[in-house]
Image (tube, rainbow, N blue to C red):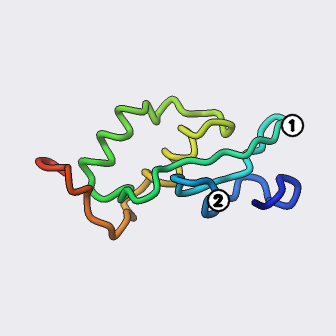
Amino acid sequence: MPSKKDMPCNKPRRSTAKGKKMMVKACEGGKEKIIHFGAKGYGHNYSAAARKSFKARHKCDTAKSKLTARYWACKKLWAGSGGSTKSSPKGRKGKY
């Protein structure tokens, strides 16, 4: 795993933690913290309905602190319409 001092601030990269998709060295207000976020194997941001549900469920509009995984998941994985090319999880039926 890269050391905290070698990582640039607020630049997400692929995670080294098992089961997590991304990691970032979050820097805010003189504090530094390594955060792992996003479930590996899950197609993030795969449809407008899924994006809307995730943002409502995790209250993305109130995620202000860069020192939280919620902030980074909302900003990096579920923001915008770019989306993943991966399809929705097999157990998902209905609006997704």
How far from the left and from the top, in percent, is residue 77?
47, 54
| In the displayed structure image, the side of residue 1 where residue 65 appears, left or right | left
Regarding mark 2 in the picture, which secondary structure is present there? Answer: loop
State the residue at coordinates (51%, 46%). 73
Q: Residue at x 74, y 50 (%)?
A: 25
Amino acid carrying label 2: it is Thr
Which residue is tagged 2?
A: 16
Q: Residues within 10 Å of mark 2 (few under 14, many from 20)?
A: few
Residue 96 is tagged as: none
Left or right: 12 in relation to 29 = left
**Pointer 1: what residue?**
30
Work out whether residue 86 or residue 8 is closer to the camera in this orientation and state it.
86
Tell me the quadrant of the picture where the N terminus can be found. Answer: bottom right
> Which residue type carries mark 1?
Gly
Q: Quadrant of residue 43?
A: bottom left
- Spot the residue most to the front: 18
How dense is the environment of label 1, judged by Cα within 10 Å: few (below 14), some, or many (20 and up)?
few
Q: Measured from the top left, where is residue 96 in percent x and y?
A: 19, 51
Q: Nearer the viewer, residue 37 or 60?
A: 37
Cα gap from disc 1 to disc 2, whole angstroms: 24 Å
Residue 84 on image: x %, y % = 37, 65
Is 85 situated above or below 95? below
Q: Of circles 1 and 2, which is in front?
A: 2
| Residue under the image location 20 percent in, 50 percent down | 91
Q: Outermost residue toward the left?
A: 94
- SS assignment at label 1: loop
Q: Whole-percent x and y of residue 34?
A: 73, 46
In this orientation, which residue lies closer to the viewer: 80 or 92? 92
- The disc, 1 or 2, on the residue closer to the chain's N-terminal end is 2
Residue at image point 58% right, 56% down: 22
